[in-house]
Image (cartoon, rainbow, N blue to C red):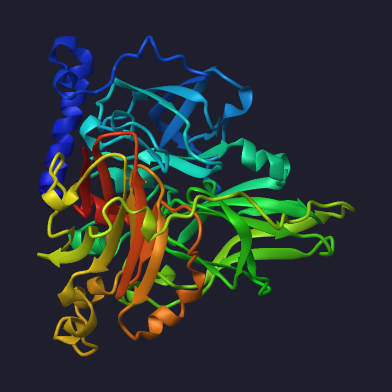
Amino acid sequence: MTHPEITRRKFLQYTILGTLASAIPGLNRAENRLINKEPDKNFRPDVELELYAQNAEVPILPGAHTHVYQYTCKLLKGPAHTVKTLPGYLGPILNFERGQKVRIFFYNRIAEPVITHWHGLHVPQKMDGHPMYEIYNGERYVYEFEIDNPAATYWYHSHTHEMTATQVYQGLAGLITVRDAAEQKLELPADEYEIPLIIQDRTFTRGNQLQYLHGRHRRMMGFLGDTILINGQANATFPVKSRAYRLRLLNGSNSRIYKLGWDDGTPLTVIGTDGGLLETPETFPYVMLAPAERVELWVDFSGRKTGSELTLQSLRYKDGGTRMGRMGGMGGGMSQGKSFPIAKFSIKERVGESHQLPKKLVPIRQLSAKDLTSPARTVPIEIGMRHMLFQLNDQTFRMHDHQNIERIPVNTIQKIRIFHEGRMSGSGRGGGMGGARGMGMMGMMLSLPHPIHLHGQQFQILSRKQNESNSAYETVKDGFIHNGWKDTVLVMPGEDIEIIKPFEDYTGLYLYHCHNLEHEDLGMMRNFDVY
Ligand code: C2O
Ligand code: CU
């Protein structure tokens, strides 16, 4: 089903259907799709907005405007700061507060099916943007949910069946912030001292149009662009004052993994992860940020000279993708693991006072083995490969499909082990497929990292184990954050990771998948059936 020809044919079919559906109401296939078209009268929203997925021409590079897909938004009810529009092509930043009831009328105005997922938010299954709920051109989906997550940085993006990669690539993504009382008390740097950094890599044609990759093998390796965009703009420079700032970073790229570091060697001070602030700030020589992961940094420019600059970089590291780079994949000069600047901070103004980094941040409910509902059970997420495609638990994605091992009782806390299938790791790997001598396409694929994302509630990491002695791992291993709430974890070749995750409140199909968007679209995704 994932053959490009078939996908293209299906795409045409969708386009025609979408047009028909909007033209002839009686022919609306939505009737059979269980999509949520009408608001619930008993739901009293604090915030109400209209969100559109539409075509747009926006300035990104000097010269011609770029054709993109773009989320645009109209606030119908709620505080004015809820919607913050960004220049460029990304959707607006949506600023929510914990406890707010939010209603979003989502309208599809592009010629492809679309559905939107609120990445990291704990919402009912029908509100989660599962691809089974895709809507066609002219249709709308009504989302209603309460913000029930701790203060952190989340995001939203399209999650359309086999089109997530291309739709996100063309712009269907945006940032979400959630604030709560525990965070408020800390009085972290806010307003102009709080900077979002949505990091993406793109490739442009000479005419400034977005260029994607073609062919199944290249898609398996993942898209790597040669131009870094921050918040949808190239060559990002931020004028700052000599004081402390809070940076909210999102890796919104399809496949690229960043090894974040300051160019002068200053350690990174991490205050938050995917799903919340940490208990205490932690410092790292560098931080690995895989697709969909977020990290919040504290950076203090006080004491720095006016006129000086500090650059956030992606540092050099080794992984399977570098070999692909040499083979001339997309972004040949910008292979995975290459070093390049991400964003420049230029100190423009000297100020006396500055925020002090709090010693303690927020209390976290630490989950451990004793919290497990059934200590004897380990839910597997086994990364494997068949017919040159990645699979999870021996299966490729099918819309409603789930196996017994993927059934999880609601209101339980589960241990989940994410690991590579036997023949892909350890001794099995040298056996002709991954050996240095026969490093073919298969070998390269086996050495790819996978950022694994689970929908629903955030999880914690219990353990991380590397089963191979491998020199590439040495170049990334000090950049993993073990504490805090996560919804995406980067699984390197040879790694075996245990996480602990609550499955509370809601039943239904919740996705788990690789957030390398090319992998996801090629079927590296499955459902958990929470019952
Ligand atoms: Cu960010 Cu299932 O996605
Ligand atoms: Cu993957």
Residue 210 in the image: above or below residue 255: above
Image side of residue 476 versus residue 27, left or right: right
Q: Quadrant of the C terminus?
A: top left
- Residue 517 lies, in percent from the top left, at 31, 52
Q: Residue visible at 61% across and 64% down?
A: 282
Choose top left, top right, bottom left or bottom right for residue 417.
bottom left
Question: Can see residue 331?
Answer: no
Q: Residue visible at 29% across and 17% down?
A: 37
Report the front residue among 184 and 11: 184
Choose top left, top right, bottom left or bottom right for residue 181.
top right
Q: Residue visible at 44% across and 53% down?
A: 486
- Residue 127 lies, in percent from the top left, at 33, 29
Question: Can see residue 143?
Answer: yes
- Residue 30 lies, in percent from the top left, at 19, 21
Residue placed furthest toward the front: 370
Residue placed furthest toward the bottom: 437
- Residue 111 lies, in percent from the top left, at 27, 30
Residue 234 in the image: above or below residue 218: above
Report the front residue among 420 and 49: 420
Q: Residue visible at 41% across and 15% down?
A: 43
Q: How many marks?
A: 0
